[in-house]
Image: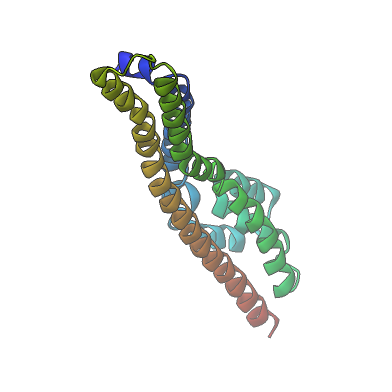
Amino acid sequence: MGSIIEAAGWPIWAIIVASIISLTIIFERFFSLRQSLVAPQGLLGQTLQEFRRAGASPELLQLLGKHSPLGRLFAAGLRNADASREVMKESIEDEGRLVAHQLERYLTTLGTIAAMAPLLGLLGTVIGMIEIFGSQAPSGTNPTELAHGISVALYNTAFGLIVAIPSMMFYRHFRAQVDALLVDMESQAVKLVEVLHGERKNGNH
């Protein structure tokens, strides 16, 4: 493997660095985008129960803010629990944009690697080909050396594709996962607003 990397030339190092960054992002996002961390089951019920017991206390808001991204949405809504339904929803939407940005962290980098890795591989192959044909002696070409040189040059393209394909697959997977989590969180936050306003309306009657 070491001899292949050495023979493939400097462009292969850019692909290796890209692969390390890609793997790091994939593992980090796998950990960070778990349902139990982002939108834990049962949090809506617990939040409503605590709100009915003590109202929108600073302790509850602080606890929710630190708990999870879904907790941050609930905290944003509860801060305006005495305001109109529209104000509550707007505050949740504002917080939702920040949460969405946090959930999408590093995905642009992963998508860029998926797009650029084949081009880096192609660049390495082209540079390798230029070097092969530039070093040919005027007296003639050794077919064995030429074949070896071309195979080494093509390693760059192969490595580029090996990095790009999984990166693109995981990029699309994580994008879909983020979208699904955001829809779920928005649905639960809207449910919180509707329940609180329904209770307030019934309490006023």
The answer to whether residue 188 is above or below residue 30 is below
- Residue occupying image coordinates x 29% and y 27%: 151
Q: Is residue 83 left or right of residue 104?
A: right
Depth order, front residue of 41/93: 93
| Foreground residue among 81 and 205 | 81
Left or right side of 106 for 146: left
How many numbered badges does the structure rendering display? 0
The foreground one among 152 and 21 is: 152
For the point 66% across and 62% down, the residue is: 92
Report which quarter residue 78 is drawn in.
bottom right
Give the percent coordinates (x, y) of residue 58.
70, 49
Q: Is residue 39 above or below residue 121?
A: below
- Residue 63 is left or right of residue 172, and the answer is right
Q: How is the image coloured?
A: rainbow
Quadrant of the frame with the C terminus: bottom right
From the image, which quarter does the N terminus lie in?
A: top left
- For the point 41% across and 41% down, the residue is 164
Name the residue: 27% across, 17% down.
142
Residue 5 figure quarter: top left
- Residue 33 x %, y %: 46, 47
Left or right of 93: which side holds 159? left
> Of residues 5 and 27, which is closer to you in this image?
5
Residue 91 place in picture, x, y as percent: 71, 62
The residue most toward the left is 144
As drawn, which residue projects farthest toward the front? 139
